[in-house]
Image (cartoon, rainbow, N blue to C red):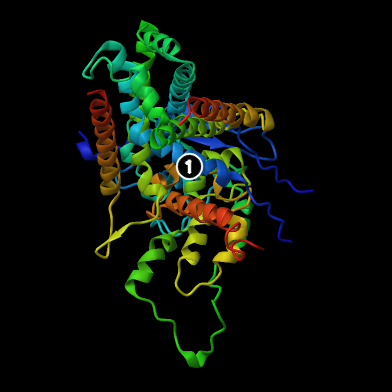
C-alpha cells in the first residue's frame, strides 16, 4: 500500500511545436509529465526534453527570474516559465507557447532580432551633457534623482511586455514598451543629456503614439518596471515637443 | 540555403483571447456612447439656435422611451468610461511626488474619481441654481 | 544605417482625445443624467431647468458658449480617436478612409456646433 505522497502526480503539458524544416505552421503536441509541487513550468518543459522528446527547443538560463530568457505564453499569458509553477494549473492541462507577437524560429524559440535593433536604436547609454575629465571625479546623484529612473532600470529584456502588447503585434515597427522604458531610464537620469537626440525616435511614426494605453505590458512585467508609464510620459514629452516648436525656436528644430 | 523560416502568427481575434483585452475593448467601446451623446447634444444645440418651438420639440423628443433607454445605456457606458479613465491614469501620467514619496496608484485613481464626483455634483447644483 | 524617422502628427489628435476623455470623465455621466433622464422623466430637477429662455441665456453667455462648444467638440474628437484606433485593433486598417470617416465626422460636428453657437449670438 503506497503512501499518499508517493503517488506520482502527472500533468498534461500542451506545447506549441514548430519545425521550420518540416512544418508549414505550428501545431500542438501534448505530453504527460510527472511532477512535484516544487516544479516550475520550465522544469516541466525540461523534463519533456530530457525524457520524452529531445528535439523540443526553448531558451532558458538562470532559473531564478533574473536572466529574462525563459519567457513563454502559459495558458495564453506571458510569464517567465521559471517562476510559474505546474501545481497552480494541475489537474487541468497547461498550454505552453512561444511568446506572442514575435516570429517563431522553432518551437518555443522566438526571433528577437527586431527587439535587439530597437534596444540599439534608443542609445541605451549615458550621453553626457558635456565632456568630463577623470580629474573632475565621479558624478554625484541624490536619492531623489535616483528614484526618477531606478524602476525603469530594472528591465531584464524578457520581452513579456511585447508579448502583452497588441499594438506591437499589429505593428512590429512600434518601438514598444521595454525599449521605451529603457529610453526613459536614460532620459530622466541626471547625468544624461541625450533627451533631444532620442526625441527623434519618440516623436516619430514608429514612436510612442502607437500605444493605446492598454496597460497590459505593465501588468505582466516580472520586475515592476511599468513600461506603460514610460511610454505615456513620453507621449506627453513628444506632444510638448510638437507644440512648443512653434513657440521656441530650439524645441524640436532639428 | 538557410533552413530558417520564422513563422509569424496571425493577430485575428486577439481581443477575445484574454479577459484583460476583452475589458480593454469594452472600455474603448464606450466611445460610441460618447459620440452618440455628443450627436444628441449637437442636434439639441442646432434646435436651440432655430428658436423656441424647435427647442421645445427637441426637449419633447427626449421623452420617447427609445431616447430614455439610450440615455440609460449611455449613463452606464460613460460612467464606466470615467472609472476606467482614472483607473489607467497612474500609468499614463508622470509620477506625483508628495513629501518625498511617490503617490501610490490607488491615491491617483481615488483623487480622480473624487474630482469627477465633485464635478458632477457641481454641475447638478449649477443647473439647479439656474432653474430657480 | 539609421533609418530616417518621420515626425508623427499624432500629438494633435492625441491631445484632443485626452482633453475630450478628461472632460467626458468629469462631466459626462452627470450631463447624460440631466439632459437624458432627469429632465425628460421629471426627476429631481425643476421641470423648467432647461427651458428655452434659460438655455438661450446660458448659450449667449461667453462661458456657457465655451462649455457647450467644448463638450460637443471634444466629446466628438475623443470618440473619433478611440474609434479610429479600435478599427485598427480589430484589423480594419483602412488608413485614409477610416481616418477621414472618424476625424472627418468630428470636424463636421465641430463646425456645426460653432456655427449654431455663433448664430445664437452674444
Pick whichever, C100 or A9, lies toward us: C100
Is residue A43 at all visible to an observer of this figure? no
Is residue A192 at all visible to an observer of this figure? yes
Pick whichever, A127 or C10, lies toward us: C10
Pick whichever, C89 or C96, lies toward us: C96
Q: Residue at x 48, y 90 (%)?
A: A136
Q: Residue at x 37, y 45 (%)?
A: B89
Question: Residue B124's image quarter?
Answer: top left
User: What quarter of the picture does the N terminus of chain C occupy?
Assistant: bottom right
Q: Is residue C118 left or right of residue B19?
A: right
State the residue position of label 1. Answer: A164
Q: Position of residue A237 (x, y in %)?
A: 51, 56
**Vertical placement of B39 versus A70: above or below?**
above
Helix, strand or loop for disc 1: helix
Pick whichever, C82 or A15, lies toward us: C82
Q: Residue at x 43, y 9 (%)?
A: B53
**Vertical placement of A150 versus A65: above or below?**
below
Label 1: chain? A
Q: Position of residue C41 (x, y in %)?
A: 28, 11
Q: Is residue A21 left or right of residue C68?
A: right
Amino acid at each position: 500500500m503506497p503512501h499518499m505522497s508517493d503517488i506520482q502526480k502527472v500533468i498534461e503539458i500542451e506545447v506549441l511545436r514548430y519545425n521550420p524544416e518540416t512544418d508549414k505552421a505550428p501545431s500542438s503536441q501534448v505530453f504527460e509529465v510527472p511532477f512535484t509541487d516544487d516544479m516550475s513550468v520550465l522544469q516541466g518543459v525540461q523534463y519533456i526534453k530530457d525524457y520524452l522528446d529531445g528535439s523540443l527547443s526553448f531558451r532558458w538560463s538562470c532559473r531564478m527570474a533574473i536572466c529574462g530568457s525563459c519567457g513563454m505564453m502559459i495558458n495564453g499569458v506571458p510569464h517567465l516559465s521559471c517562476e510559474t509553477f505546474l501545481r497552480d494549473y494541475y489537474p487541468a492541462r497547461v498550454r505552453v507557447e512561444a511568446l506572442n507577437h514575435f516570429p517563431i524560429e522553432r518551437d518555443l524559440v522566438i526571433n528577437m532580432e527586431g527587439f535587439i535593433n530597437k534596444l540599439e536604436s534608443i542609445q541605451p547609454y549615458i550621453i553626457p551633457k558635456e565632456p568630463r575629465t577623470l580629474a573632475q571625479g565621479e558624478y554625484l546623484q541624490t536619492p531623489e534623482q535616483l528614484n526618477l529612473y531606478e524602476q525603469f532600470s530594472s528591465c531584464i529584456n524578457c520581452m513579456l511586455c511585447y508579448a502583452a502588447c497588441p499594438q506591437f503585434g499589429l505593428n512590429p515597427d512600434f518601438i514598444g514598451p521595454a525599449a521605451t522604458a529603457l529610453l526613459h531610464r536614460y532620459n530622466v537620469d541626471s547625468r544624461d543629456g541625450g533627451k533631444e537626440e532620442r526625441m527623434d525616435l519618440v516623436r516619430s511614426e514608429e514612436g510612442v503614439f502607437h500605444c493605446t494605453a492598454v496597460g497590459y505590458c505593465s501588468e505582466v512585467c516580472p520586475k515592476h518596471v511599468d513600461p506603460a508609464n514610460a511610454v505615456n510620459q513620453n507621449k506627453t514629452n513628444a506632444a510638448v515637443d510638437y507644440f512648443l516648436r512653434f513657440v521656441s525656436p530650439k524645441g524640436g528644430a532639428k | 540555403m538557410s533552413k530558417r523560416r520564422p513563422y509569424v502568427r496571425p493577430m485575428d481575434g486577439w481581443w477575445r483571447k484574454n479577459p484583460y483585452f476583452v475589458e480593454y475593448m469594452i472600455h474603448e467601446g464606450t466611445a460610441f456612447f460618447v459620440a452618440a451623446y455628443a450627436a444628441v447634444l449637437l442636434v439639441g444645440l442646432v434646435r436651440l439656435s432655430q428658436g423656441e418651438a424647435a427647442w421645445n420639440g427637441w426637449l419633447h423628443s427626449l421623452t420617447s422611451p427609445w431616447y430614455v433607454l439610450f440615455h440609460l445605456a449611455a449613463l452606464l457606458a460613460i460612467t464606466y468610461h470615467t472609472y476606467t479613465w482614472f483607473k489607467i491614469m497612474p500609468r499614463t501620467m508622470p509620477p506625483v511626488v508628495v513629501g518625498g514619496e511617490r503617490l501610490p496608484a490607488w491615491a491617483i485613481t481615488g483623487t480622480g474619481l473624487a474630482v469627477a464626483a465633485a464635478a458632477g455634483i457641481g454641475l447638478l447644483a449649477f443647473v439647479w441654481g439656474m432653474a430657480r | 544605417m539609421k533609418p530616417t524617422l518621420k515626425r508623427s502628427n499624432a500629438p494633435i489628435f492625441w491631445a484632443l482625445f485626452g482633453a475630450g476623455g478628461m472632460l467626458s470623465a468629469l462631466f459626462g455621466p452627470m450631463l447624460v443624467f440631466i439632459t437624458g433622464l432627469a429632465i425628460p422623466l421629471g426627476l429631481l430637477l425643476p421641470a423648467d431647468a432647461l427651458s428655452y429662455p434659460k438655455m438661450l441665456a446660458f448659450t449667449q453667455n461667453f462661458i456657457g458658449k465655451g462649455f457647450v462648444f467644448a463638450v460637443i467638440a471634444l466629446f466628438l474628437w475623443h470618440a473619433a480617436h478611440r474609434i479610429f484606433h479600435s478599427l485598427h485593433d480589430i484589423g480594419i486598417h483602412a488608413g485614409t478612409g477610416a481616418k477621414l470617416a472618424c476625424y472627418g465626422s468630428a470636424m463636421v460636428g465641430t463646425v456645426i456646433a460653432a456655427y449654431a453657437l455663433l448664430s445664437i449670438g452674444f
